[in-house]
């Protein structure tokens, strides 16, 4: 059996379905370039029929990606498939990914289709897809809760109609390692033509089993893993790319397979995604979390000093963590700054390096030591500002019970000032912003943490705000924590405004 495992990254499609994680076209392009650099085999760029913005996002990714295949999702409907093919025609290596559910519960309540109708629809959808593009993947949605023999019949139909890849997803995160291993073995043994296609596994993490199930599926014969950076995705997320790749790399004795991921690009990819979406990586997240390689107990530290292998199963450097958290000085220069930014996952152009350098010098004047996390925060702040419709010019707060906030926002060439009363500085400043912008949000989550050590640390703020039934995440950073929170609130507000503007452009509103 072949030992190459293909990595199908769906951060930009299934990952983007994480509540509040929506990415605009620029963000998708930036992330796609990083995924390409990391060596993923396939980048699923989006669901082109979903909206005009999504269609254009897939086109932009398709045009820019040089090495990876680019996939687009389509239901088993002619209009979806044609739309996806239209977006993907710009890709060097396009993959049309079409899907239809196969479990009885989906057939009865969602699709209202008989099994025969499903077979017929799959055959026609895959044939149409194959007539439009050279490579087609078919996914049997909710495969793990489907009748095995019917599933094998559907798979055989898709193969007969020309599918190159067959994906058997655990859509609801219900299966277990033993079960999914057996499912793959059974379907591969039953479906005629199975030896001519690649089987793929796509797992959701509702029971925390997504990575374990993906690894078991490989043992059952899957040769493609669908996953996302930081494990983001619908509900509890998807198989985490970094975990499944490092499990295979670290346990070659158990998983003697290889994949094309450049593992040192894992942490930079995680950083970039977190910055783009505002979804923070928990400190204890395997592989990419800040504490993933931190040894706290004295016994562990002692062992580590004697030989790192006593407590370390892989090196931080192998996944792109910098062991020495480089302290930058005023004399680091623009080239040093650009190099360090690139190591952190941010490829900046000359103009951006210039802007970053100004902020860096300002910070180095205020703060004794500038760590790489400070630099990350500076880039976060600069990046979120670059796309802001409204930018924070000035913030002042006074008094308590109630607090008064004075906020100055820049909107194009205009500078608008408002004052408001509130229950504390963050509340007062949010009310002042709402008065200026004319939209009111409900702050649903508010997290604040220090990005770096020391009393003069950078504060990192992450918020979730609901505007008219849509949830947005926002992030902000500053050495002043109230200002960090307000940057984050404004960031979410700006995403909402950008969304409303895109609706107007598309005539959807
Ligand atoms: O979870 C799922 O079943 C999916 C399919 C569309 C592949 O995301
Ligand atoms: Zn999914």
Image (spheres, rainbow, N blue to C red):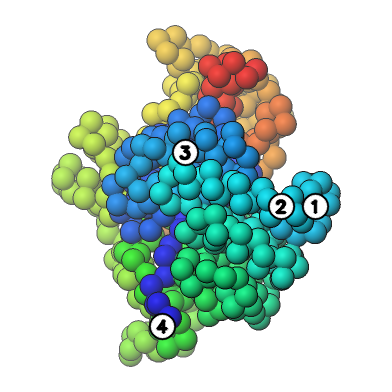
| Residue 358 visible within the image | no
Q: Quadrant of ligand 1?
A: bottom right
Viewer-nearest of labels 4 and 2? 2
**Which residue is identified by label 3?**
85
Residue at image location 36% in from the left, 37% down from the top: 90
Q: Nearer the viewer, residue 374 or 109?
A: 109
Q: Is residue 438 left or right of residue 481?
A: right
Q: Secondary structure at mark 2?
A: helix
**Which residue is identified by label 2?**
118
Q: CA distance from mark 3 to mark 4?
A: 36 Å
Viewer-nearest of labels 3 and 2? 2
Q: Secondary structure at mark 1?
A: loop
Q: Is residue 292 above or below residue 506?
A: below
Q: CA distance from mark 1 to mark 3?
A: 28 Å
Q: Is residue 21 left or right of residue 359?
A: right
| Residue 392 visible within the image | yes
Residue at image location 27% in from the left, 34% down from the top: 352
Provide residue 100's location: percent of width, then percent of height: 66, 51
Q: Is residue 177 left or right of residue 409?
A: right
Q: Residue furthest top?
A: 414
Are dots 2 and 1 in contact, CB under 8 Å? Answer: yes
Provide residue 460's location: percent of width, then percent of height: 49, 46
Q: CA distance from mark 4 to mark 2?
A: 37 Å
Q: Secondary structure at mark 3?
A: helix
**Which residue is identified by label 4?**
256
Q: Within 8 Å: ligand 1 and the Cβ of disc 3?
A: no
Are dots 4 and 2 in contact, CB under 8 Å? Answer: no
Q: CA distance from mark 2 to mark 1?
A: 6 Å
Say which label, 4 or 1, has the lower sequence index: 1
Mark drawn on residue 114: 1
């Amino acid at each position: 059996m072949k030992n190459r495992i293909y990595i199908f990254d769906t951060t930009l499609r299934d990952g983007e379905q994480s509540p509040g994680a929506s990415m605009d076209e620029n963000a998708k392009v930036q992330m796609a370039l990083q995924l390409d650099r990391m060596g993923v085999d396939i980048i699923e760029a989006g669901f082109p029929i979903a909206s005009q913005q999504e269609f254009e996002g897939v086109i932009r990714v398709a045009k820019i990606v040089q090495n990876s295949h680019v996939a687009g999702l389509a239901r088993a409907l002619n209009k979806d498939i044609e739309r996806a093919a239209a977006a993907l025609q710009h890709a060097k290596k396009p993959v049309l990914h079409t899907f239809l559910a196969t479990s009885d519960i989906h057939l009865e309540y969602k699709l209202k289709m008989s099994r025969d109708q499903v077979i017929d629809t799959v055959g026609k959808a895959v044939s149409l897809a194959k007539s439009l593009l050279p490579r087609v993947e078919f996914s049997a949605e909710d495969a793990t809760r489907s009748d095995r023999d019917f599933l094998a019949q559907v798979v055989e139909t898709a193969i007969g109609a020309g599918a190159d890849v067959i994906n058997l997803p655990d859509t609801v995160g219900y299966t277990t390692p033993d079960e999914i291993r057996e499912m793959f073995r059974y379907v591969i043994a039953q479906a005629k033509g199975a030896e001519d296609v690649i089987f793929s596994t796509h797992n959701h993490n509702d029971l925390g089993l997504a990575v374990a199930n993906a690894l078991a599926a490989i043992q059952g014969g899957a040769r493609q893993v669908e996953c996302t950076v930081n494990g983001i995705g619908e509900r509890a997320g998807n198989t985490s790319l970094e975990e499944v790749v490092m499990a295979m790399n670290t346990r070659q004795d158990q998983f003697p397979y290889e994949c094309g991921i450049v593992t040192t690009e894992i942490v930079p990819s995680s950083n970039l995604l977190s910055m783009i979406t505002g979804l923070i990586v928990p400190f204890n997240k395997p592989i990419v979390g800040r504490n993933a390689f931190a040894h706290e107990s004295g016994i562990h530290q002692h062992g580590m000093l004697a030989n790192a292998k006593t407590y370390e199963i892989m090196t931080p450097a192998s996944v792109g963590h910098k062991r020495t958290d480089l302290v930058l000085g005023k004399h680091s220069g623009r080239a040093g700054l650009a190099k360090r930014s690139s190591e952190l996952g941010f490829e900046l152009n000359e103009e951006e390096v210039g802007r970053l350098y100004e902020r860096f010098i300002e910070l180095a004047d205020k703060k004794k030591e500038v760590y790489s996390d400070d630099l990350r925060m500076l880039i976060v702040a600069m990046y979120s500002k670059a796309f802001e419709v409204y930018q924070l010019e000035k913030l002042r707060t006074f008094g308590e019970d109630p607090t008064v906030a004075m906020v100055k926002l820049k909107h194009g060439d205009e500078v608008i000032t408002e004052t408001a009363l509130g229950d504390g500085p963050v509340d007062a400043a949010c009310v002042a912003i709402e008065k200026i912008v004319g939209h009111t949000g409900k702050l649903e989550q508010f997290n604040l943490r220090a990005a770096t050590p020391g009393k003069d640390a950078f504060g990192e703020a992450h918020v979730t705000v609901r505007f008219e039934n849509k949830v947005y995440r926002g992030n902000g950073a500053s050495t002043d924590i109230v200002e960090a929170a307000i940057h984050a609130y404004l960031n979410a507000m700006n995403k909402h405004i950008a969304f409303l503007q895109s609706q107007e452009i598309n005539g959807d509103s």
